Image (cartoon, rainbow, N blue to C red):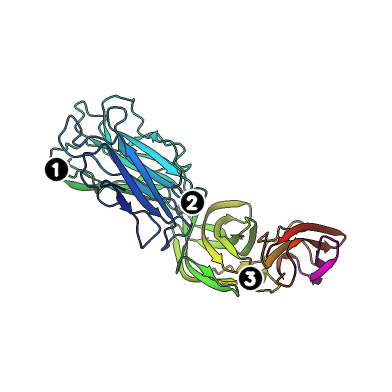
Amino acid sequence: MGADTVKIFCPKCQCVYHPPPVRSRSSSHHVAGAAGVDGAAFGTTFPHLFLMTFSNLVPDPLPPTDFRDNSFPSIAVDISGKTYNGYIHIVWADYRNNDADIYYSRSTNGGTTWSTAVRVNDDPFGNGKDQFFPWISADPNGNVHLFFYDRRDASNNVNFHGYYTRSTNGGATWSANERVTSVSSNPYTDFGGQFIGDYNGITSVAHKAHPLWTDTRNGNQDIYTSKISWGTAPVASIGMMPNNTPITIPPGGGSFTYTGVLGNNTASPASVDVWLKLTLPNGTPYGPLLNYNNVPLAANQVLSVSGINQAVPSYAPAGAYTYWALVGDFPLTVMDSVGFRFTKQGVVNNAVNDQEWALSGWGFDSGPMDALLPEAIMLLDNYPNPFNATTTITYNLPISGDVDLEVYNLLGQKVTTLVDGRVEAGQHSVSWDAANYSSGIYFYKLSAGEKSYTKRLTLLK
């Protein structure tokens, strides 16, 4: 990397750090970055490194003025745990149309590849009006917000306003630009041709965006902010902040703790359901682990509960999980949801049921509801597959009954019985330790009542 390289990373949290820009007259820049995009709300690791090259950066100074208005790109990482979790968003001022425009690109794979750059400001192309000093952020719901300086309203292309736009679909499209400032700023007033927008910023939460900027409406450099309300906020919102990330659970089981936040976004009392569930390493949903029914919330109330403890049993398959909290009207209406990841390192051979996913600490007076029962008998894919030498088999029972779970080789010979007896209704997992068996293809068969189901698994040593 050459002299224009900027290393962008933060060793304390899962965001990308963008330092104050430095002056440069080069026509292109390289930006190197490190992004923690593992889905947790907080973290200490940065598994993704990326390098981007930008051409057509605006000249410095930008005609017809002689003040500095070039800046390095601004970067935001989506760590919401929702649809666009892990997306990296980047914006910069670009001169490809012979005036300054704001361009945007995104990466959905940790910076390995980037989307085609798109122009975000919606004034006419090549109109000689400049947009510059963009700042971008991603909110806890995965929406992306952008604030920038804009000269479209200035006949002399000198004075500037602050403009805002947002994307609610991961950067695929952007809303119509909105002018935030009511009075334009003259860059020659108290700026002295220097540093007019280096320390602007924007943040957003609960369908409200808050840009922060410098302008000179009163004849001096002053700091201003504004509240931009948009969309319709859900009745209730939920959040989780895990402790001691990244979370790794040993093969014998363990637990993790987090702070949960539940809020009423309305000016009226509300009653909501809260439930917790998992996405297993093979992508299968599991749960709910626990439900809380009819949790009362006063108008505009926000509850913050620390020290919530979630146990992870020994039988849980090895791999990466997503842990979800949802609020709404259980089970069909979800007002809001949030998730973070944890990893299980291995499995201890132990056939137990989902009651060992013990959860405590939310403290809602209404108490837990029974877990939602499966609607039909189902034999799920084992995980991992192929495996060496332990794999986990999961099955669903809508009602209690006698169950046989057996493993056969390619010759049709039964090699082991994993379950033989009466099993309660619910979702169950059992591990098969095949350390004493030869590599090859095996079949596992579930018999419950008059029905049977068979799937294939592969043992590799």
Q: In the rendered view, does 62 fall on the left or right side of 387?
A: left
Callout 3 amino acid: Val
- Residue 256 position, x and y percent, is 51, 70
Please report whichever mark, 1 or 2, sits nearer to the chain's N-terminal start. Answer: 2
Judging by the rendered image, the residue that carries numbered circle 1 is 191
Q: CA distance from mark 2 to mark 3?
A: 28 Å
Residue appearing at x 84%, y 59% in the figure: 452
> Can the viewer see residue 309?
no
For discs 1 and 3, the disc positioned in front in the rendered view: 3
Mark 3 crowd level (few <14, some 14–19, many ≥20, 10 Å Cα): many
Question: Element at badge 3?
Answer: loop
Residue 128 sits inside the magenta stretch? no
- When the figure is inspected, residue 81 is found, relative to residue 248, above or below; the finding is above
Q: In the rendered view, does 130 fall on the left or right side of 245?
A: left
Q: Which residues are magenta?
A: 402-425
Residue 416 sits inside the magenta stretch? yes
Judging by the rendered image, the residue that carries numbered circle 3 is 347
Identify the disc placed on residue 126: none
Please report whichever mark, 1 or 3, sits nearer to the chain's N-terminal start. Answer: 1
Identify the disc placed on residue 85: 2
> Can the viewer see residue 425?
yes
- Residue 450 position, x and y percent, is 88, 60
Question: Element at badge 2?
Answer: loop
**Quadrant in the picture for the C terminus:** bottom right
Residue appearing at x 56%, y 72% in the figure: 250
Callout 2 amino acid: Asn
Residue appearing at x 19%, y 31% in the figure: 158
